[in-house]
Amino acid sequence: MGLFGSGAQLTVNLDEALVLLKDDAALVDVREIDEWEAGHAPEAIHIPLADVPGSPKGFDPRKPVLVICRSGRRSLTAAAQLRDEGFEAVSVNGGMVAWQQAGGLVVRNGGDPGTIV
């Protein structure tokens, strides 16, 4: 089976996520507002975990969705919920901690340098 589809994996590592982002996947950050405001990936869309089920989504449902949180636990839940709603969603292993450790840009709203809390 491919990355997405019946029985497909629910997680991807950071390298796989970066390839998918280059191919125009959406990146959804499901952390709480204080975590988001402290620092997030510049290309991410913020939808707190509690708001994921049934919320209007700001991304194209025909494209893959990468879900990220601080470490990868909350994003697993959100990816499963998005799959239940018909999206091709996966969780990014290691979350924003892995993102930052790999040199990924972390910004605050407005573009100033951010941090992961």
Image (tube, rainbow, N blue to C red):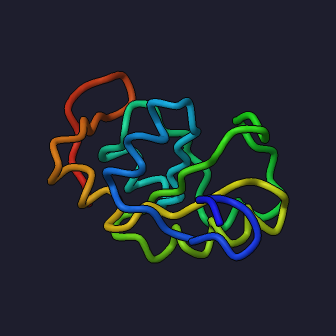
Which of the 4 image quarters holds residue 45?
top right
Q: Name the residue at the top extreme.
A: 110
On the picture, is 74 further left or further right than 61? left
Q: Name above or below for residue 45 compared with residue 69.
A: above
Q: Residue at x 17, y 49 (%)?
A: 102
Instruction: Answer left or right for 12 relative to 56.
Output: left
On screen, residue 69 above or below 61: below
Residue at the image position 78 percent from the left and 38 percent from the top? 62
Query: How far across and how far down the image is residue 56, in percent?
Result: 81, 45
Residue 64: image quadrant is top right
Q: Nearer the viewer, residue 13 or 105?
A: 13
Q: Nearer the viewer, residue 55 or 104?
A: 104
Is 38 left, or right, of 10 in this rendering?
left
Q: Residue 104: x percent and y percent? A: 23, 40
- Point 84% across, 58% down: residue: 86
The structure residue drawn at horizontal position 62% and vertical position 60%, both measured from the top left corner, is 2
Residue at far front of view: 1
Q: Quadrant of the N terminus?
A: bottom right
Q: Position of residue 117 (x, y in %)?
A: 26, 60
